[in-house]
Amino acid sequence: MKEEAFGMNKKVVIIALVLICSIATVTLGEWTVHLFRDPIMSRDVWYADSPLTYPLKQMSFPPSGATAFITIMFDGKNDSVTISFSSAPIIMNTRKENTYELFTTNVVWDNVLEQVQFYRFPGSTILFFDDQKYAITRMRNSRTMILELNWYLNGTVYFMFDLTGASDAINEIHAKFGK
């Protein structure tokens, strides 16, 4: 999903606005669905947030610990999925590509280990799945996802996401557009 710089910048602004709205609305225990009215593009974007999760072991940095959640967005045409953190992860072993950092890491879908590629903009709290469609398909068909990150000053850190209800939430945001 490597778009031209101008198109990518618009998408990043929209995603950032949606995620700012969603930070205040993520609840513990179930997926939540929300509407974001995009004032820039004059369109609706429906999104679903996963329950908030914590690392499986306490982190030494940032001192307060980090939290994360998944957001799946649908604008009537395209799905996108991101993972947002409460503080920007300093991920080791990334490589620079144009205006973003690219890295591959382990993800466990239920009990199936895979190598998954992500990208993010430097300093951002948001990770993007490189293959959005594949990630959404896996989320629809899995109960859990464990993300492994090589986080600076912490070593290997794992976040386990509860995907129970993800498929229903995706269906709900698609139904808002009659799809």
Image: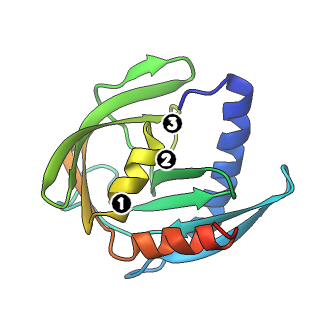
Mark in front: 2 vs 1: 1
| Amino acid bearing label 3 | Gly
Specify whether 75 is left or right of 159: right
Mark in front: 3 vs 1: 1
User: Could you tell me which residue is drawn at 33 percent across and 69 percent down?
Assistant: 163
User: Could you tell me which residue is drawn at 49 percent across and 47 percent down?
Assistant: 125
Q: What distance separates the C-alpha of mark 3 from that of mark 1?
A: 26 Å
Please state which of residues 52 and 162 is positioned toward the viewer in this rendering: 162
Task: Of the two numbered discs 3 and 1 on the same chain, state the one appearing first in sequence.
Answer: 3
| Amino acid bearing label 2 | Thr
Q: Assess whether mark 1 and mark 3 are in contact (beta carbons under 8 angstroms).
A: no
Specify whether 93 is left or right of 71: left
Q: Picture coordinates of residue 76 (x, y %)? A: 69, 58
**16 over 35 or under it: above or below:** above
Q: Picture coordinates of residue 169 (x, y %)? A: 49, 73
* Secondary-structure class at tag 3: loop
User: Could you tell me which residue is drawn at 71 percent across and 44 percent down?
Assistant: 13
Q: Badge 3: how crowded within 10 Å, few (<14), some, or many (20+)?
A: few
Q: Badge 1: how crowded within 10 Å, few (<14), some, or many (20+)?
A: many
Q: Label for residue 147?
A: none
* Residue at numbered disc 2: 125
* Secondary-structure class at tag 2: loop
Q: What distance separates the C-alpha of mark 3 from that of mark 2?
A: 7 Å
In the rendered image, the quadrant that contains the C terminus is: bottom right
* Residue at numbered disc 1: 139
* Residue at numbered disc 3: 123
Please state which of residues 68 and 32 is positioned toward the viewer in this rendering: 32
